[in-house]
Image: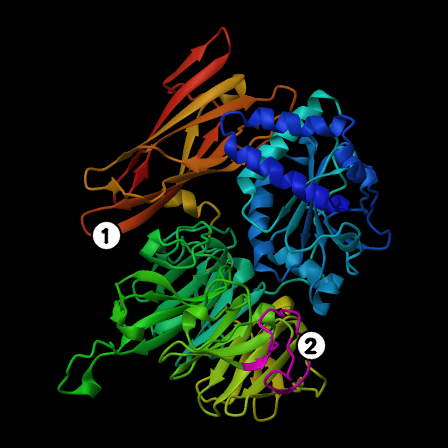
């Protein structure tokens, strides 16, 4: 018996995409032919894609647009290769796609024929509001056009199924490719490059500009910009000033004692002035002089020593990982969007006999809300024997709770439980409370055995991640909307919640699992209006609550006796600084020797070959089985590289560069290549990270071979690395 299936147009595109990716993976040496054959189908009379060719769709005419001076139409974008990024700004996977798109746009500009359009398709009610989307666009540095498809009209018209989804349109507006989820960067780069070349030969690419205009804030930011988590030790607070890529340490009077990091993001260890972060979200005091930071967009765990004035990376490679188990030491362990941190202390469970059990020292465990893999991880500074007598080595970073699936699944066994983008942590003596944002719930995990239990919100069905709302009540009868922050008050034993997308602060009686809303008023008795609060902290007395009013770029102090609020004003005058804004020099990374500059006349040659050779000091070696990576960070529009990232082989890599003579060179340097090396000495392993910027001026000292016949250039660039310095 035969049967036929009537596939929709988007089903056909999905099938074609999967077929193309399979051919791409299996024909590594002839990918150009694979793409040529694929593009040829769109010009041929192919009945199998007739339904796709007949598909008609367009943006609604009454939608809000961002980062453009006038609305765009798909018809008006004919001649461009268009990538439609269907996203919602709460989604961690959507956040992970943004750097991939940013790198794509840097390589293939609008004038080269590529346009990326973010189609915001909201999950939560709060995400339908234009002002909130604008705040998110600025928070995440999105510069390409965004349309607020608040009713998901285009999503439904094209039968899009998940966030994120990247739909690539041909220059004639036909859907050619549909990529669902994250992690398609290399394939997408190759596809776009091949498509622009193919359709460019057919003179179907429009190289004109677009009416791009970066949208500005609806209100000016204060000297805080999108503040996130707040932590306290005694009478001192730490604030993750996420939008300024820094951490502030302040007194209870608001006097700023330290500001660590700066507006120019990066992953730089060193002294407090030159250190760099990238969208730090979580902070926790390890002791009076030591802070742990969840450096979210660097995918790293960092430590700030106020006493020694040093910032160091504890775990994370600087690149997003996708491991669900972990276990590597320190900087060798990749992380994925750590969003918050908490500190827990306990004794070894080694079953040893101790004469005085009370004097057995406690050891420290740093708990991490790993939003990117939907898990709770742990970093073990000292090493410990813990649950089920498992031994954790010193400096290892490992998954503790959650199997990595995106679910709201409670379970007596920690590795059988599942979270949905855990984003906030609060520690009591025996329980870790978790703001599980995508399930809109608050949950807790026992520190005795790892058992995960419900507190309030969400749904009994672990697969239902749409059980959100704004309802006070008990357990599953209560409803929240994407909560990001929790704080435990040890005085009244209440858990305070930043119910972020409901713009409210709520309080939970942890004995009854009942949540209620705090009605907070200003000093003049008007109702306090919050905008996506994401961080909370209780003061030492237990009578005041600090709230990070994230999208209002401010912090409030709430008197828990009267529920009256006042602004927590910061005084930057006590630290050596010329302005109240972040004022660390933009060239700080150059001052540390982490950015090297080389002059090579790339723009004077049609083709160039750069041979990078990394030479290590005698006491260093490349870590076995660890990747030695390189990535192109920026490239002049007049230059083209087919491969934009890769791994070194025996400390070497070869880059092939083509000069596009019909493209006007930009003003920036020719290239910027970032290297990330995993190295070991006799005692430990470490990460060395640096950038080599190539300018296109001939300094006369270049050891290069140039051929006049084909106008090509071959250059060897040696980089010497030792324990304390990196140099050319």
Looking at the picture, does residue 230 appear above or below residue 395? below
Task: Say which quadrant the C terminus sits in.
Answer: top left
Magenta region includes residue 521:
no
Residue beneath disc 2 = 469
Residue beneath disc 1 = 684
Is residue 474 something that shows in the picture?
Answer: yes
Q: Is residue 644 left or right of residue 7?
A: left
Residue drawn 51% across the image and 59% down it: 372
Pinpoint residue 14: horizontal percent, then vertical percent: 67, 44
Looking at the picture, does residue 620 appear above or below residue 325? above
Which one is nearer the viewer's eye here, 176 or 65?
A: 176
Which one is nearer the viewer's eye here, 199 or 640?
A: 199
Pinpoint residue 100: horizontal percent, then vertical percent: 56, 45
Q: Residue furthest top?
A: 709
Looking at the picture, does residue 685 appear above or below residue 406? above
Pair 2/1: label in front: 2
Q: Residues within 10 Å of mark 2 (few under 14, many from 20)?
A: some
Magenta range is 455-480
Element assignment for label 2: loop
Element assignment for label 1: loop
């Amino acid at each position: 018996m035969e049967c036929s299936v009537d596939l929709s147009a988007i089903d056909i595109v999905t099938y074609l995409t999967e077929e193309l990716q399979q051919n791409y993976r299996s024909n590594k040496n002839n990918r150009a032919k694979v793409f040529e054959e694929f593009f040829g189908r769109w010009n041929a009379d192919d009945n199998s894609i007739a339904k796709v060719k007949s598909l008609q769709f367009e943006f609604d005419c009454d939608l809000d647009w961002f980062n453009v001076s006038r609305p765009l139409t798909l018809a008006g974008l004919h001649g461009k290769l268009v990538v439609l990024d269907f996203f919602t700004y709460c989604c961690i996977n959507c956040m992970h796609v943004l750097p991939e798109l940013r790198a794509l746009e840097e390589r293939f500009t609008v004038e080269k024929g590529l346009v990326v359009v973010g189609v915001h398709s909201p999950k939560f009610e709060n995400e339908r509001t234009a002002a909130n989307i604008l705040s998110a666009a600025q928070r995440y540095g999105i510069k390409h056009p965004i349309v607020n498809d608040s009713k998901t009209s285009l999503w439904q018209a094209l039968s899009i199924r998940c966030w994120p989804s990247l739909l690539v349109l041909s220059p004639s507006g036909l859907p050619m490719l549909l990529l669902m989820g994250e992690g398609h960067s290399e394939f997408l780069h190759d596809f776009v490059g091949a498509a622009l070349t193919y359709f460019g030969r057919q003179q179907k690419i429009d190289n004109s500009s677009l009416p791009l205009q970066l949208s500005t804030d609806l209100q000016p930011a204060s000297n805080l910009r999108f503040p996130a988590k707040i932590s306290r030790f005694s009478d001192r607070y730490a604030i993750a000033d996420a939008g300024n890529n820094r951490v502030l340490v302040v007194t209870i009077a608001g006097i700023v004692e330290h500001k660590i990091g700066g507006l120019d993001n990066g992953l730089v260890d060193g002294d407090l002035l030159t250190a760099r972060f990238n969208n730090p979200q979580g902070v926790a005091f390890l002791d009076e002089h030591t802070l742990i930071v969840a450096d979210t967009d660097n995918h790293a765990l960092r430590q700030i020593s106020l006493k020694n004035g040093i910032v160091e990376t504890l775990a994370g490679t600087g690149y997003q990982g996708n491991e669900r188990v972990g276990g590597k030491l320190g900087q060798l362990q990749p992380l994925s969007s750590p969003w918050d941190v908490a500190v827990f202390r306990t004794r070894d469970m080694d079953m040893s006999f101790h004469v005085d059990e009370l004097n057995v020292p406690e050891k420290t465990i740093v708990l991490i809300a790993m939003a990117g893999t939907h898990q709770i991880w742990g970093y073990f500074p000292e090493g410990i024997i813990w649950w089920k007598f498992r031994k954790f080595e010193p400096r290892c970073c490992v998954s503790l709770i959650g199997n990595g699936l995106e679910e709201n699944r409670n379970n007596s066994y920690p590795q059988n439980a599942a979270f949905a983008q855990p984003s906030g942590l609060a520690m009591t003596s025996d329980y870790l409370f978790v703001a599980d944002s995508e399930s809109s719930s608050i949950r807790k995990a026992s520190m005795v055995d790892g058992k995960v239990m419900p507190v309030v919100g969400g749904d009994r069905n672990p697969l239902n991640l749409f059980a959100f709302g704004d309802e006070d009540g008990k357990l599953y009868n209560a409803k929240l909307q994407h909560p990001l922050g929790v704080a435990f008050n040890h005085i009244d034993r209440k858990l305070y919640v930043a119910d972020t997308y409901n713009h409210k602060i709520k309080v939970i009686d942890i004995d009854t699992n009942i949540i209620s809303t705090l009605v907070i008023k200003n000093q003049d008795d008007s109702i306090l209006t919050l905008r996506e609060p994401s961080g909370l902290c209780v003061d030492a007395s237990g009578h005041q609550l600090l709230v990070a009013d994230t999208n209002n770029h401010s912090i409030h102090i709430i008197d828990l006796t009267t529920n009256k609020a006042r602004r927590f004003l910061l005084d930057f005058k006590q630290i050596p600084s010329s302005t109240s804004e972040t004022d660390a020099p933009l060239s700080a990374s150059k001052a540390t020797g982490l950015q090297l500059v080389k002059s090579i006349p790339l723009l004077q040659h049609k083709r160039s070959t750069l041979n990078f050779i990394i030479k290590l000091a005698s006491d260093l070696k490349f870590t076995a089985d660890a990747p030695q990576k390189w990535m192109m960070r920026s490239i002049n529009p007049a230059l083209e590289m087919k491969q934009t990232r890769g791994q070194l082989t025996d400390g070497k890599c070869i880059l092939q560069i083509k000069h596009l003579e019909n493209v006007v060179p930009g003003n920036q340097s020719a290239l910027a290549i970032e290297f990330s090396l995993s190295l070991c000495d006799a005692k430990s392993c470490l990460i060395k990270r640096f950038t080599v910027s190539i300018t296109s001026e001939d300094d006369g000292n270049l050891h290069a071979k140039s051929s006049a016949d084909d106008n090509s250039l071959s250059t060897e660039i040696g980089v010497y690395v030792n324990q304390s310095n990196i140099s050319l």
